[in-house]
Image (cartoon, helix red, strand yellow):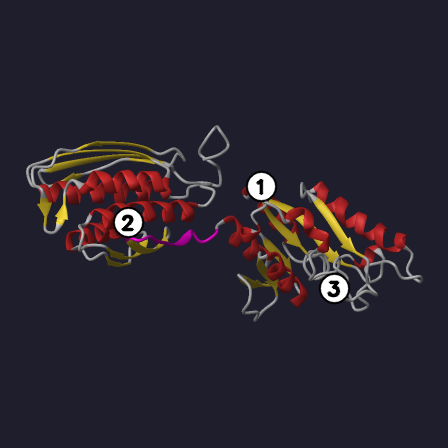
Amino acid sequence: MKKVLFIDRDGTIISEVADETIDTLDKIKFLPSVISALVDIGKNTDYELVMVSNQDGLGRQDFPAERFWAPHNFMMNILESEGIKFKEVLIDTHYEEENSPMRKPNTGMLTGYMNADYDLGNSYVIGDRDSDVQLAKNLHAKAIFIGENNPDVELCSGSWDEIANFLINPKRRAELRRTSKETDISVKVNLDGKGDYNISTGIGFFDHILELFSKHSGIDCEILVKGDLQVDEHHSIEDTGLVLGEALLKALGNKRGIERYAFYLPMDEARAEVLLDLSGRPYFIYDVKHSREFIGEFPTEMLEHFFRSFSDGLRCNLHISAKGENEHHIVEGIFKALARSMKLACKKTSQDLPSTKGIL
């Protein structure tokens, strides 16, 4: 789905003026860094740009339209000359109709974006007034406020450099909860964390290997599982793999700049090899023979189920093979190898999408 930046004009792209009327060229003063920031956003994100503005001067008998459009078009020509292209420019002229559906913060001008083609939940309204923040709420979108001290927005800033960095390098975090008759699982992940963890599954060895995954991947993980352990461990382990994989996929976002591929790792006498491709296509191979039925309370037959669910949720190619003498070492080696593979594959080294298809 498409994402949009709905950007106000006066006070956001160009400075406000005392009489609130941009009717001459000398009144056009761009906010610091706004042009370079919009260029970077256009090059390095998938957002469409839409200008949305209330203009009280238009429609007045004493304010001919050409007085507005001449400086406006001059401004737009400058932006376009720098490669900044707006999909649409929407100007409300209903200055006498305070409750007009076309007037911000109402959404009448934006009905074309309120359909299944657009991901408004991950789109932003960028503006300098409370009406811009309210417009975001009415669209069920997020808001960026040009200014300070607004608790209802994702970012308050007067710096377009900061806004560009926020949009180009979003925090790679996700939360997910899955509840069924068999399990209730809550997962939070931060791909750019420090490997901090809070894990409780009700299965001691499962907690241990998930903690290894978090620590060695550098991914902060909160994994809280309530399952029907009175039946057996199957549902808790399998469903945890699915939800963890889905949460990591959500946190990856558009996957721009990631390394995508990875592999690994020895563990004492055991050797574990994990081949990983964050390809968007789930495919799983598991070449490990287990000599013990349980490690602690953890049934080793469930490892293949866990990793298959993990691969399905993360929509990745995942090939796992391992050999060794000590079953504990084999399983620890696999989880450490997976962790290090995730750390490398998720690492951002550019703004490019690592695929000739143009999508992952």
Res 194 visible: no
**Which residue is situated farthest in the top direction here?**
356
Residue closer to the observer: 87 or 315: 315
The residue segment tinted magenta is 170-182
Q: Which residue is the site of mark 2? A: 240
Instruction: Give the distance between the C-alpha atoms of the residues marked 2 and 3, in whole angstroms.
Output: 52 Å
Crowding around mark 2 (Cα neighbors within 10 Å: few <14, some 14 to 19, many 20+) is many
Q: Residue at position x 45%, y 40% from top?
A: 257
Percent across and percent down for residue 323 are 12, 33
Which of discs 2 and 1 lies nearer the camera? The answer is 2
Percent across and percent down for residue 112 are 68, 46
Q: Residue at position x 58%, y 44% from top?
A: 116
Q: Residue at position x 37%, y 52% from top?
A: 192
**Amino acid type at mark 2:** Thr
**Which residue is situated farthest in the bottom direction here?**
149
* Left or right: 123 in relation to 230: right
